Image (tube, helix red, strand yellow):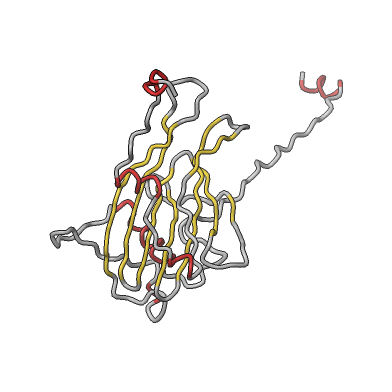
Amino acid sequence: MTVEAASKTVTAPKLTRREMMALRGLLLPHKLEKVGIRVEATISIEHQRLAGRYVLRGKECGGATSELGAYCGFVAEDGSALPWTQKIDTIGVNGVHAVVISPALVRVEVLRVEHTYDLLITRHSLQTAKEKGKKPRLVNEVIFEGRLGQLPLELWGRDKQLRGSVCPAFMTRSGEPFILPETFEEAVRSTVAGACCIGCRRHTHLLTQPRPRVEPAPVATTTEEVSPSSIAALS
């Protein structure tokens, strides 16, 4: 490579820890794979040819054992539930449960080690490219990062009736309460439930079943023949 060519080589800026976390999600221990828990937090950009637009694709996935749990799910930017695009039924457990397609997503991830929880909430959207015809850029933002949260309940066992209704308590490094964004409290409770669902299979904790499309009923029309005598009577 010539000196001139080398000078034109553009080096991609190195991502900070927070930027890397916003893009890839929580750093998960290898032990999850060894106990059969599969989490795919990656978000991809897909092109819808018929609609002529780009969208985001994510996977709700995860599950638990009594010792470990990890779960990844998605909601809308306002915290409301999203319908799944594709429901996946598999023989295995604690894996991918459904696929969601949307122009924007909020990803909620939980990693549990017995009663200790890590939580990450990130927002993902598309930024239109400046050059026409180019693929848009994925924009990622960390909304909330909670470390070492505590929840002294066995939601995977004797306290499973409370699953989906409680959240871990998080603190700052100085010991003060670290409050969850109210908009995403319900989503966090559901994700915690997923991280405590032993042998999670054939159901989702965040994505919901799509509403069936209701086709409009055909309008009944009648055509009546008008006889000359009827016209004469009216006149």
Q: In the image, what residue occupies the spot 25% across and 65% down? A: 169
* Residue at 41 percent of width and 79 percent of height: 157
- Residue 72 on image: x %, y %: 44, 57
Query: In which quadrant of the rendered view does residue 162 lie?
Result: bottom left
Extreme residue toward the front, this view? 2
Looking at the image, is 120 positioned above or below residue 57? below
**Residue 186 x, y percent position in the rendering:** 36, 58
In the rendered image, the residue lying farthest to the right is: 228
**Looking at the picture, how far across and down is residue 119, in whole percent?**
33, 58
Q: Quadrant of the N terminus?
A: top left
Tell me if 232 is positioned left or right of 160 in this view: right
Relative to 177, 197 lies left or right: right
Residue 142 to residue 206: above or below: above
Rendered view: 46 above or below 185: above
183 is higher (above) or lower (below) than 1: below
> Along the line of sight, which residue is nearer the eye, 200 or 42?
42
Residue at the limit of the structure toward the bottom, as seen here? 158
Which percent across, then down, holds residue 171? 20, 61
Q: Residue at x 57, y 65 (%)?
A: 202
User: How many labels were placed on the picture?
Assistant: 0
Tell me which corner region of the image, top left, top right, bottom left or bottom right, holds residue 230.
Answer: top right
**Residue found 57% across the figure and 49% down from its top:** 85
Decide if residue 207 is on the left or right side of residue 91: left
Quarter of the image containing the C terminus?
A: top right
> Which of 99 and 69 lies nearest the eye of the viewer?
69
